[in-house]
Every structure is written in structure tokens, then in C-alpha cells.
Amino acid sequence: MKMFKFIFNTRLNALIAEGKKLEEKLVHNDPSLKEDIGYKEFKYHFFPFKAGMGVFFVTVILNLLLSSAMIFSIFITYLQDITHDKLTIITSVFISIFWFFLFSYSVFLLGKGNNNALYIHKIMYQLIILISVAFFLLDVFHNVILFFLLVSSALLVKVVMNTRYFYKIITEIRFFRITHVFLSNDMKGIMNMSRKESKRYAREIEAKKRREIRDKKRKNM
């Protein structure tokens, strides 16, 4: 990854822009969207296994890093003179925020497939860096190692969100989600058909499949 692209979030911004474009096409019912996601080829009728595993690991890594960094950056003053009671409070808050971010990330990303989860994590790692630097300049950070750990965790999240693998995972999730929006709409349309209309629709689908098979055979000849 080039330094320029890393600093300016080139791939992450491209991912966000692509998400906006897909959302606009979906809202305006653009017919080209089905071709973009390979709807007719049944590419994303089932959730891709690689995307599923990738989402699991990326979700845990991002939330663990961000939650840890945010907690330590906010409660850094308590860590200077720690006691048993303070340690209990910090641990409880850490666990609560970790699960909150884990849940919100999963709902936003897997449930809707839009840019909200990306915005949340982009803003969070930027805030962590700013808070850490501000505390360091104000001489609140007496532990230099802790300061670098916080900044490193935020930068690691930035690296993950700018990788090709992350771009591919999020894109596949979006295609899967949009595919099932189309499937739901098609199913509703079929359920509302009369018996005569449903028979005609079934014949049209069958004829379409036969044409596709004939076309494939002609291409292979």
C-alpha cells in the first residue's frame, strides 16, 4: 500500500463512494443494478463463505482494537493511579462498550449493508488518534509506551480498512444484501399473482431458461 493512499484513505473512500452509488441505484430501481451484482447468474443468492469468515475476523479485530483504544484513551487519567475499584469500573465499561460496538457494527454492516458501519469506525479511529495526541501534548500521558500502543491500534484499523481484502468483503456483503432485496420483491410479486398469471410467469421463466441453454450450446459449437 502506497503511503499517499494510506494517508488519504484512497481505497476506503472509494468503497464508501461505491456504496453510495449502489444505494442510489437501489432507491431509484435502476435496471443496471441486477447486472452489476450478477443477479441473473445467481452469484450472491447464497452468502459467500470467504466473506462470512472475513467479516467475523475483521469485526472482532476492529471492535477489539477500537474498543480497547477508546476506553484507554478516555480513562487514561484513572490508569495513572489505579486501584482495585477503578480497575473493576474500567473493565466493566470496556466489556460493555466492546459488545455495544460489536453489535452495532454487525447490525449496520450485515443488516443493511450501507456505509454506516464504515463511517462509525472511520470517525472512531480518527478520534482516538486526536485524543491520544491531545493527552500527550497536555502531559497527561506519563506512559509513552501506552501512547504508542493507542496510536498503533488506531493506525492498524486504518490499515485494515484500506486493504483490498476488506474492500472485497464489504462489496460481497452489499451484493448479497441487494440480491436478497430483489429476491424478496420478486417473491412478493409472485405471491400477489393470480393463478393464471402465475402459470404464465412459470412458462416465461421456463422458456427463458431454454433460450439461455440454447445460446450457451451455440457459443460452444
Image: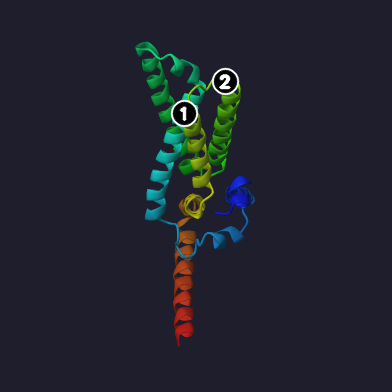
Colour treatment of the image: rainbow
Looking at the rendering, in which quadrant would you find the C terminus?
bottom left
In this view, the residue farthest toward the bottom is 221
Residue 138 at x, y percent in the picture: 60, 20
Picture coordinates of residue 74, whole percent (x, y): 51, 22
Secondary structure beneath label 1: helix
Say which residue label 2 marks: 139
Give whichever of discs 2 and 1 has the lower sequence position. 2
Residue name at image x 44 percent, y 30 percent: 68
In this rendering, is residue 66 above or below 26?
above
Residue 136, position as x, y percentages in the image: 57, 25
Front position in the image: 12 or 182: 12
Nearest the eye: 63 or 194: 63
Q: Residue at x 41, y 24 (%)?
A: 94
Numbered badge on residue 146? 1
| Displayed quadrant of residue 85 | top left
Q: Position of residue 91 (x, y in %)?
A: 38, 21
Taking the image as shown, residue 68 lies to the left or right of residue 9, namely: left
* Residue 14 seen by the camera: no
Q: What crowding class fits label 2: few (fewer than 14 Cα within 10 Å), some (14-19), or many (20 or more)?
A: few
Q: Quadrant of the N terminus?
A: bottom right
Q: Which quadrant of the structure image shows residue 89?
A: top left
- Three-letter code for the amino acid on which mark 1 is drawn: Leu
What residue lies at 48% left-to-right and 76% top-to-bottom?
A: 211
Image side of residue 114 versus residue 199, left or right = right
Q: Amino acid at mark 2?
A: Asp
In the rendered view, tell whether residue 84 sits above or below residue 174. above
Circles 2 and 1: CB distance less than 8 Å? no
Observer able to see residue 74: yes
- The number of numbered discs placed on residues in the rendered structure image is 2
Give the CA distance from mark 2 to mark 1: 13 Å
